[in-house]
Image: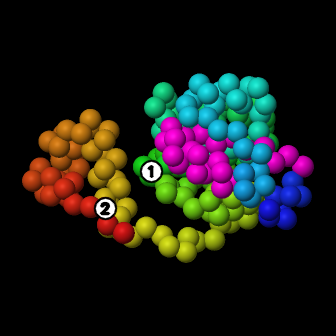
Amino acid sequence: MDDTIAALPDKTVLVVDDDAAFLTRLGRALGGRGFDVTTAGSVSEAAAAASAAAPAFAVIDLRLEDGSGLTVVEALRKKREDCKIVMLTGYGNIATAVAAVKAGAIDYLSKPADVDDVVKALLANPEDRPAPPDNPMSADRVRWEHIQRVYELCGHNVSETARRLNMHRRTLQRILAKRAPR
């Protein structure tokens, strides 16, 4: 157990994600580091857990099957002002990061997030500036993530996505057929 975590007066953490395997892994990893973990797989489960006992910390996925993780952030903020919340998402962009911070999250991490990065974000002093990432996404990866997000928002319609990205449809199809760059 980490000494910093052991010294905390309240070690409760709520982990919210609709990916059951990821939720289990992250919950176990945080529990192994000394946190008292509660998990939820949906907005409704998270709201119920937050109203029963508002945690000191929370790790919340932005996109859940039954709604947005921002709803959970707002519910937690109403129950406990000092809750430190970290948002996780597989579809990171500036607009959602700004929305998460405005809602009350202290940090915003892209999936797959390393548990050490999650713990570091949860325990960070809000006045400290975060260090630059050791392994940031490449420009190709950022471009690919953006294209995937627009593609998903367009309901997987290639023609509409190509129009919105001002890109030829065949070019977009070739990009979508390839694996994600590192």
Residue 8, picture quadrant: bottom right
Q: In which quarter of the image is the N terminus?
A: bottom right
Regarding residue 100, the answer to whether it shows in the image is no
Residue labelled with disc 1 = 90
Residue 25 is one of the magenta-drawn residues = yes
Identify which amino acid the numbered label 1 is placed on: Gly
| Upstream in sequence: badge 2 or badge 1 | 1
Q: Where is residue 174 in the image (x, y as percent from the top left)?
A: 15, 58
Describe the element under mark 1 as helix, strand or loop: loop
Quarter location, residue 12: top right
Query: Which residue appears farthest toward the bottom when viewing the image?
Result: 134
Horizontal and vertical percent for residue 46?
63, 31
Specify whether 158 is left or right of 21: left
Name the residue at 27% across, 61% down. 179
Neighbor class of circle 2 (other Cα within 10 Å; few <14, some 14-19, many 20+) is some
Left or right: residue 168 versus residue 150 is left
Tell me the crowding category of disc 1: few under 14, some 14 to 19, or many 20 or more residues within 10 angstroms, Cα based: some
The residues tagged by marks 2 and 1 sit, at their Cα atoms, a distance apart of 13 Å
The residue segment tinted magenta is 9-30
Q: Can residue 88 be seen in this view?
A: yes
* Residue 124 drawn at (x, y percent): 73, 60
Q: Which residue occupies 66% across, 55% down?
A: 29
Residue at (43, 67) in percent of width and height: 137
Which residue is rendered at x = 77% and y = 39% of the image? 55
Residue topped by disc 2: 180
Q: Does the stretch in magenta take in 149?
A: no
**Which image quarter is the C terminus in?**
bottom left
